Amino acid sequence: MRKRNNKNTKKPASYNGLFSFVALAFFIAVITAIFIIRVAKKADFFKVKEINVLSLGCGGRTFAPNLDYLKNKNIFSLDLKAIGDSIKSNYFFVDVVRVSRFLPGRLIIQIKEREAAAVISLGSKGVKDSAFYVDKNGMLLDIRGEFNKNLILITGLENRLSNPKSGRTYYDPVFLYSLELVKMLVSSAELKSYKVNRVNIKDETKVSIFISPVVLSNEVGLVSPPQIEAVMPVKDLNLKLKILARILNSLSDSLSDIEYIDLRFNEPIVKKRIS
């Protein structure tokens, strides 16, 4: 029986020479890059001379963070992530910050604010004097500029959030549930023909939804009939919303006469307005 020859086959000299050349070229490239970066970090040509801030969704505020301390610093010496983190830590309403270098000496800073998911009323002085915007994570945001009437108003939680203040995030379970409910209502395909104006929730057992259809009028544009209050249990809420949509669609010719729909029982109760 023949023995196998376990001796390694020698590689051609040309292969070894090519490998050595590639390794040497890579080493020279790395050394050159390090040298260029070190020189660039000391060169006045690459000092920051211009800072452009682009703000998205500023909620009616004029937002211009003071970033003058970055000027005349070498653009390669800056920690872009640290700059973004600093802006976010100093301005609670900022959600995302992206910092980019544009050589030789310009910084572009893109800032996106937190988006309001709803409006929440937390006092007895009226919506304008005691309301906050609230984002999807439960942070309260102050209202500046023109009030966004397209957002759903949350009421009934006046006594659940202590000392409400912009910039604070709250984790009260009923409060967080109300945000989930708003998200559900906004994304509901069944209720897309109706405008949800307000959600009133005081505990985990029931919720009132105030809704109105949008009716097209040839003379005055879009008008809304009186609101309809729909009361339903928190349990199986998704199913109850579908039932509500079916009831509203079946009564489409007389919605202005409907005042109240109660879905807490096996058979829905529909109450008409008293004329």
Image (tube, helix red, strand yellow):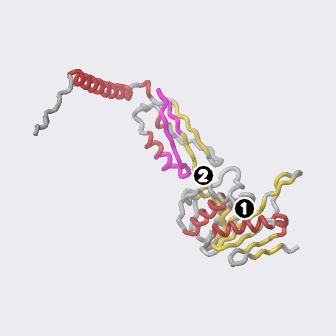
List the single residue furthest toward the front.
Answer: 1
Residue 115 numbered mark, or none: 2
Q: Name the N-terminal-most of marks 1 and 2.
A: 2
Density class for disc 2 (Cα within 10 Å; few <14, some 14-19, many ≥20) is some
Which residue appears at 74% of the width and 69% of the height?
229
Residue 157, by quadrant, is bottom right
Question: Separation of disc 1 and disc 2 at Cα?
Answer: 19 Å
**Image location (x, y in percent) of residue 261:** 75, 72
Q: Amino acid at mark 1?
A: Asn
The secondary element bearing badge 1 is classed as: strand
92 magenta-colored: yes
Q: Amino acid at mark 2?
A: Glu
Between residue 216 and residue 32, name the one nearer to us.
216
**Image location (x, y in percent) of residue 225:** 82, 62
Density class for disc 1 (Cα within 10 Å; few <14, some 14-19, many ≥20) is some
229 magenta-colored: no
**Image location (x, y in percent) of residue 80:** 44, 39
In this rendering, the answer to whether 250 lies above or below 86 is: below
Which quarter of the rendering shows the N terminus? top left
The secondary element bearing badge 2 is classed as: loop
**Image location (x, y in percent) of residue 31:** 30, 26
Look at mark 1 in the image and give the residue it sits on. 197
Which residue appears at 62% of the width and 56% of the height?
117
What stretch of residues is rendered in magenta? 85-109
Q: Is residue 18 left or right of residue 253?
A: left
Which quarter of the rendering shows the C terminus? bottom right
Residue 186, by quadrant, is bottom right
Kindly indicate whether the residue at mark 2 contacts the one at mark 1 (C-beta within 8 angstroms): no
In this rendering, the answer to whether 27 lies above or below 195 is: above
Q: Is residue 242 left or right of residue 17?
A: right
Which residue appears at 55% of the width and 69% of the height?
173
